Image (cartoon, grey):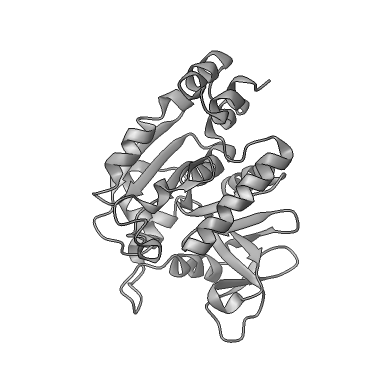
């Protein structure tokens, strides 16, 4: 399976912060925002990754990650000329995806939970074994603000509604999606919505109609944070700060994940830590066992 991070958009809800800097490069406590979705792909066992962003912002991501070899990854880049919907990612990434399955994660979403790696890897396996799509559902008190999924006892999605007046469930569909290779053909076949975008909901509805859509429920003990507003960004920073201080462990530390997952060895970990040694981040990497 390959992975795509969609890191486009103009971040207007975060102006003036994002008038010069991409939203996904803003700090969330001790690391750039994009580290968090990248860590999700890495924990999924995905090492071939495509970052999609604007013509203005893409060079900054390239400066940050290069080709990804230092992390044991292969990172590619693609310009999104205009933000025409989440499903556009599969069209822009068609050549990159090739004949592989694919995971799409949004560049401003943060996921946390002790069982997260296993959950992610199970989703990859479900797509491979059953050729079904897997979306993630998170319980919210205000489901009318989100795309909402209802599901049966076997976690098969039975309905998807976009910002419903009378929601059938409280489970919002969050910015993490695992698809079989057929998603490319589906994305190329859907029509733009009333707002002129290729909606990810339209893609999910195609799988729903074929009874090929599963919901992975993020239950008690998991957290999902969307960092799209000033308040949400501040809350995410405080969340990460408290967890890291209380546990003495870092969240979404991509260098540590690369080491733990076997993408790099101890020597490379120390090489990555050395330039960061004056910060607590570099010291943390050096002290990993």
Q: Quadrant of residue 258?
A: top right
130, 134: nearer the viewer? 134
Q: Quadrant of residue 40?
A: top right
Across and down, in percent, residue 96 comes to 35, 42
Residue drawn at point x = 33 percent, y = 72 percent: 191
Task: From the top left corner, tell me how far across and down residue 284 is, in percent.
Answer: 61, 27
Single out the residue that lies furthest toward the front: 278
Q: Decide if residue 131 is in sight here.
A: no
Determine whether 272 is above or below 210 in the image.
above
Q: Which quadrant would the C terminus be assigned to in this image? A: top right
Q: Is residue 153 left or right of residue 264?
A: right
Instruction: Tell me what residue is drawn at x 37 percent, y 56 percent.
Output: 17
Residue at the spot 51% in from the left edge and 57% down from the top edge: 233
Task: Tell whether 208 sits left or right of 116.
Answer: left
- Residue 228 drawn at (x, y percent): 46, 61
- In the rendered image, the vertical position of residue 178 relative to residue 39, given as above or below: below
- Residue at (43%, 47%) from the top-left corner? 4
The reply, left or right, for residue 9 in relation to residue 46 is left
Relative depth, front residue between 236 and 138: 236
Query: Which of the 4 image quadrants contains residue 65?
Result: top left
How many marks on residues? 0
Q: Position of residue 66 (x, y in %)?
A: 35, 31
Residue 271 seen in the figure? yes
Vertical comparison of 255 with 120: above or below: above
Q: Please state which of residues 115 and 273 is positioned toward the viewer in this rendering.
A: 273
Residue reaching furthest to the top:
267
Extreme residue toward the bottom, this view: 165
């Amino acid at each position: 399976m390959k992975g795509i991070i969609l890191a486009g958009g103009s971040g207007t809800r975060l102006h003036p912060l994002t008038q010069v800097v991409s939203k996904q490069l803003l700090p969330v406590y001790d690391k750039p925002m994009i580290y968090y979705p990248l860590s999700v792909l890495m924990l999924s066992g995905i090492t071939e990754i495509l970052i999609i962003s604007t013509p203005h912002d893409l060079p900054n991501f390239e400066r940050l990650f290069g080709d990804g070899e230092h992390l044991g990854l292969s990172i590619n880049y693609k310009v999104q000329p205009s933000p025409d919907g989440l499903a556009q990612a599969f069209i822009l990434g068609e050549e990159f995806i090739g004949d592989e399955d694919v995971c799409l994660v949004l560049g401003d979403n943060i996921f946390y939970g002790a069982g997260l790696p296993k959950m992610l890897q199970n989703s990859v396996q479900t797509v491979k074994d059953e050729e079904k799509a897997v979306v993630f559902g998170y319980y919210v008190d205000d489901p009318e603000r989100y795309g909402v999924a209802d599901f049966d006892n076997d976690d098969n999605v039975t309905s998807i509604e976009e910002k419903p007046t009378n929601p059938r469930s409280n489970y919002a569909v969050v910015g993490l999606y695992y698809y079989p290779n057929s998603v490319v053909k589906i994305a190329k076949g859907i029509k733009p919505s009333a707002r002129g975008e290729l909606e990810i909901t339209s893609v999910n509805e195609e799988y729903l109609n074929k009874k090929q859509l599963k919901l992975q429920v993020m239950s008690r003990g998991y957290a999902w944070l969307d960092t799209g507003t000033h308040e949400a960004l501040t809350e995410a920073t405080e969340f990460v700060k408290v967890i890291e201080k209380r546990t003495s462990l870092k969240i979404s530390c991509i260098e540590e994940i690369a080491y733990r997952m076997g993408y790099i060895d101890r020597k490379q970990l120390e090489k990555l830590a050395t330039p960061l040694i004056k910060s607590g981040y570099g010291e943390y990497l050096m002290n990993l066992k």
